[in-house]
Image (spheres, rainbow, N blue to C red):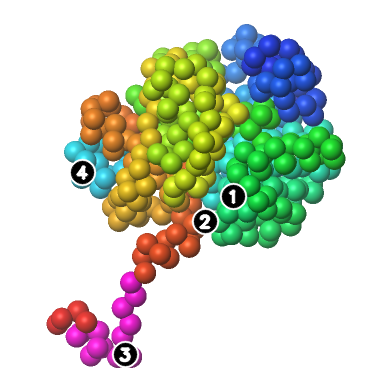
């Protein structure tokens, strides 16, 4: 790794006000807009080459350190990134397509894709000498921020809706974070966390912070490098707040500017019927996201009624000729069964939304069966054990020895 940084400053996506790259600011002071890290791409194009990666021994997302805004001496890592990209062989046979690829992002250290953004975010917090951080999350992000904060020696406060799965929150507790269950909606949880950050001066690690997107963009680098810099036609991403999809697009755009790829894939925003503000806003032709009144369904990780970066997601979908689609709980369950029984992959419901969306898009002929598609699988099924206990409850009890077994098997 090298310590030459190409990151220049942070910029508001709405009013374009610039802020220093080394600032603890997490949203625009003038208009309240979300921020983005800006780079000197002219210099990057001159100084960075694909050939540099061939000799790199790094097997984490920091393989792409030259594209990231943190010096190597500040890196906080648990070995995140470089997750498998596999062909869904059995699923392809069933669906009549040989072009379904699965990005196993649940193989990240804490069991979810969130570790990509968190590694860069907490590395930046370490660089800024931050002592305390805060996050509002229903599970995966809380676990990730908690783990990396523990690694960095930073105190972490987690605000979660009181209805969130305890199975996910226990992981945060194990890392030593202080958890608060907010008796209200997901949005009220965000507002509570934001108020606490403002009052106590903690460093906010939520979706308005610019740095998680910088880690998320490595998803695009990995997919393209794994495919010999020949991107797929489509990338399907389960979407709640939108940070992951935005990061993926930023990575693709950077690779395009560098001349490393010749096209940008169309992106698919996959949501649940129970909470699909981005899908509904796109269907109505809006360029802004209108919050939904109520969130429900089994895809708990996607239950964000008012995504802070939703407007940016809409813009990206239009720019990439992408799609947004929501799927029912029944379709999500069917996708879970397909992945587990056909491919040996055990994921949480929010993650299965990606395959459920692809199934529906192919059924209605929005995506051709011959087009190469990558589905990002974002979270491990080990995080939602209670849900699966109810789904798979049959245990055949037998007496010791083989005779009762033979009877049960009707031999």
User: Magenta residues, as a range?
Assistant: 394-407
Marking on residue 399: 3
Image marks 2 and 1: residues in contact by CB distance under 8 Å:
yes
Dot 3: few (<14), some (14–19), or many (≥20) neighbours within 10 Å?
Answer: few
The residue sitting at 56% across, 32% down in the picture is 306
Dot 1: few (<14), some (14–19), or many (≥20) neighbours within 10 Å?
Answer: many
Q: CA distance from mark 3 to mark 4?
A: 39 Å
- Looking at the picture, does residue 8 appear above or below residue 273? above
The residue sitting at 34% across, 51% down in the picture is 333
Q: Quadrant of the N terminus?
A: top right
Give how far across and how far down residue 397 sits, in percent. 33, 82
At numbered mark 2, what does the secondary structure look like: helix, strand or loop? helix
Residue 105: say if magenta: no
- Residue of label 2: 383
Front: mark 1 or 4: 1
The residue sitting at 44% across, 47% down in the picture is 297
Q: CA distance from mark 3 to mark 2?
A: 32 Å
At numbered mark 1, what does the secondary structure look like: helix, strand or loop? loop
**366 to the left or right of 225:** left
Whether residue 47 is visible: no
């Amino acid at each position: 790794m090298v310590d030459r940084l190409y990151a220049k400053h942070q910029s508001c996506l709405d009013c374009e006000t610039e802020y220093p790259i080394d600032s603890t600011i997490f949203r625009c002071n003038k208009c309240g807009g979300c921020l983005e890290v800006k780079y000197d791409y002219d210099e990057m194009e001159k100084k960075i080459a694909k050939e540099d990666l061939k000799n790199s021994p790094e097997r984490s997302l920091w393989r792409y350190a030259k594209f990231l805004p943190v010096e190597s001496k500040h890196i906080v890592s648990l070995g995140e990134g470089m997750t498998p990209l596999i062909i869904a062989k059995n699923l392809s046979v069933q669906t009549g397509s040989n072009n379904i690829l699965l990005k196993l992002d649940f193989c990240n250290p804490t069991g979810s894709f969130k570790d990509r953004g968190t590694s860069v975010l907490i590395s930046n917090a370490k660089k800024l000498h931050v002592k305390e951080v805060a996050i509002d999350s229903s599970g995966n992000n809380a676990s990730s921020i908690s783990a990396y904060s523990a690694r960095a020696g930073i105190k972490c406060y987690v605000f979660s809706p009181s209805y969130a799965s305890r199975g996910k929150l226990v992981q945060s507790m194990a890392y030593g974070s202080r958890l608060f269950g907010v008796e209200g909606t997901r949005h009220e949880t965000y507002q509570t966390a934001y108020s606490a950050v403002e009052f106590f001066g903690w460093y906010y690690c939520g979706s308005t912070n610019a740095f998680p997107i910088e880690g998320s963009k490595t998803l695009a680098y990995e997919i393209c490098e794994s495919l010999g810099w020949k991107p797929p036609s489509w990338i399907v991403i389960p979407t709640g707040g939108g940070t992951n999809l935005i990061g993926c697009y930023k990575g693709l755009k950077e690779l395009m500017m560098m001349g490393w790829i010749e096209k940008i894939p169309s992106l698919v925003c996959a949501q649940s019927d129970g909470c699909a503000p981005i899908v509904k806003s796109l269907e109505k032709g809006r360029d802004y996201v209108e919050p939904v009144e109520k969130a429900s369904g089994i895809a708990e990780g996607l239950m964000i009624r008012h995504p802070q970066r939703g407007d940016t997601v809409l813009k990206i979908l239009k720019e990439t000729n992408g799609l947004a689609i929501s799927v029912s709980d029944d379709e999500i369950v069917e996708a879970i069964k397909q992945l587990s029984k056909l491919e040996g992959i055990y994921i949480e419901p929010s993650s299965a939304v990606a395959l459920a969306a692809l199934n529906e898009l192919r059924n209605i002929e929005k995506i051709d069966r011959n087009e190469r598609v990558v589905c990002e699988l974002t979270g491990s099924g080990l995080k939602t054990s209670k849900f699966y206990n109810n789904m798979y409850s049959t245990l055949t009890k037998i007496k010791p020895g083989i005779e009762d077994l033979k009877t049960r098997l009707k031999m």
